[in-house]
Amino acid sequence: MGNRIYMDNNATTPCDPRVLEEMLPYFTDKFGNAASRSHTFGWEAEDAVDKARERIADSLGVLPKEIVFTSGATESDNLAIKGIFEAYASKGKHIVTVKTEHKAVLDTCKALQKKGAEITFLQVDSEGLIDLDQLRDSITDTTILVAVMWANNETGVIQPMPEIAAICEEKGVLLFSDATQAVGKLDVKPKETGVHLLAFSGHKLYGPKGVGGLYVSSAHPRVKPAAQIHGGGHERGMRSGTLNVPGIVGLGAAINIATKEMQREAERLSRMRNRLETALLEIEESRVNGSTAHRLPHVTNLSFRCVDGEKLMATFNQKLAVSSGSACTSASLDPSHVLTAIGLSDEMAHASIRFSLGRFNVEEDVDLAIQLVRNGVDNLRKISPVWEMWKEGLLNDL
Ligand SMILES: *Cc1c(COP(=O)(O)O)cnc(C)c1O
C-alpha cells in the first residue's frame, strides 16, 4: 500500500491474495453456470459452490442448505427483514430492533413502516449495549422479529446474543442478527446461540465485494422468508439469479482462512489496538466510545474534545485511512447515529475517529498512527479558540 496506512477495515478489507488465487479459475476456465445440469462446465461450478457452502456452514456450525448466497450484507438484511415481514404478516406486524443498527437494517425497517409495520427502536446505554428487560418488555403478541446486530461497525461493541436469544426463545419470536462485523472475527455460531437468521458479507472478511450470505434456520424452527428477488428459483427459492460463482468461491475461502486464523489474529490485533488506544488516551480530554469489555478485538472509537474528526483526518495528509463519526449522508455531515445513541453530544460525535485494524497491519503502523494523531490534535487545538475557552473553563460540557 506504499506509504499509506489502512486502518479502516470495518468499511472494507482488501481481498486476501490466497482468496483471489482460489477465485481466479472461476472467471476463465471454470466459467460454468452452477445451475447447468447437463455438462461438466456446470458441474464444476456447482461443485465449487457446494464446497464454499460447506466451508461457510462448517464455520458457522449450521447445515450447508441453510446458507443463502446474496450480493452482500445489505441484501441479506433486506431479505431477512422484508422476507419475514411478508411471510409472517398473518401473525403480526411488529418488529423490534435497535437504534445503533447499520442503516441497511434501520432503513429497511423504516421502509416497512410505510407498509404498515410497527417498529420499536430500542435504546442503548452509554456503553452501547441494549437493556435486556427493555427487550423483553417490548415483545408483544404481534411481534414477528427481533433484529439485533452481533457487533457494531462503528464502535465494535458486541451485544449479549445468548441472552437476547434466550428472551426470544422464551417469547417464541424469531431472532435475526446482522453479523457482518462479527463473522470471521468472533466465533459466531447462530444455531448454537439461538439466532434464526444471520447476515454476513465477503468484503468485510478479506473476501471479494458484491457477495454475501444469509443463514436461515431450516428446522426447529423452520424459517422461510419470502423471496425479494424472483426468477429461476435458485437458493431454495429464497434468492433467484445466476450464482456469482467466483465471488462465492472467494467468500468460502475467506471464511475458511478467517476461521483458522481467528484466535491468533484476535490476539495480535487486540495487542496492537490496545497499544494504540492506550497511547491516544494519553492525549488530554480524549475518551473511548462504547464498551471496552464487550468489543471486537481490532476496533477502537475515540473522541478528542474540541477536535473535528474530519479536520483531524485532513492533517494526516492521506498517510492514514480511518473514519470519522460524521456520517456522510448525501451532502450534509450528520453526527453518527450510533454515537449520539450512546449519549455523545453532536460535538463529541463529530470529534470521533474510528480505528479498525486488520490482517495487513503491522506494529509500525501503530507507531505512525499514534504520531499522526498526536500531532494533528496538538496542531488543531493550538489554533482553536473553542479549546482555549474550554481550558479556561468558560464552556460547559460540549
Ligand atoms: C458493511 C456492513 C453492511 C453492508 O454490507 P455490504 O456487504 O457492503 O452490503 C451491513 N451491516 C454491517 C454491520 C456492516 O458493517
Image (spheres, rainbow, N blue to C red):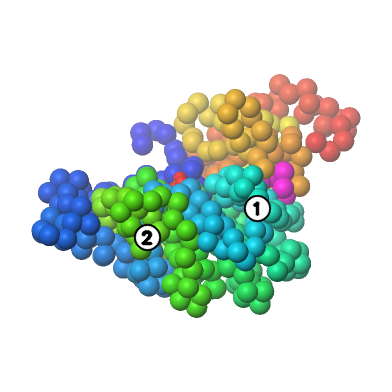
- Amino acid type, mark 1: Ala
> Magenta residues?
338-342
Q: Nearer the viewer, residue 314 or 148?
A: 148
Where does the image place residue 19, in percent across and percent down from the top left? 28, 52
Q: Which residue is mark 2?
A: 237
> Disc count in the image?
2
Image height check: is 320 above or below 227? above
- Amino acid type, mark 2: Gly
Q: Nearer the viewer, residue 327 or 80?
A: 80
Give me the residue at 53% from left, 53% from top: 82
Where does the image place residue 174, in percent across and percent down from the top left? 58, 68
- The label shown at residue 117 is 1
Where does the image place residue 387, in percent across and percent down from the top left? 77, 29
Q: Is residue 341 magenta?
A: yes
Q: Nearer the viewer, residue 295 or 217?
A: 217
Give me the residue at 52% from left, 38% from top: 322
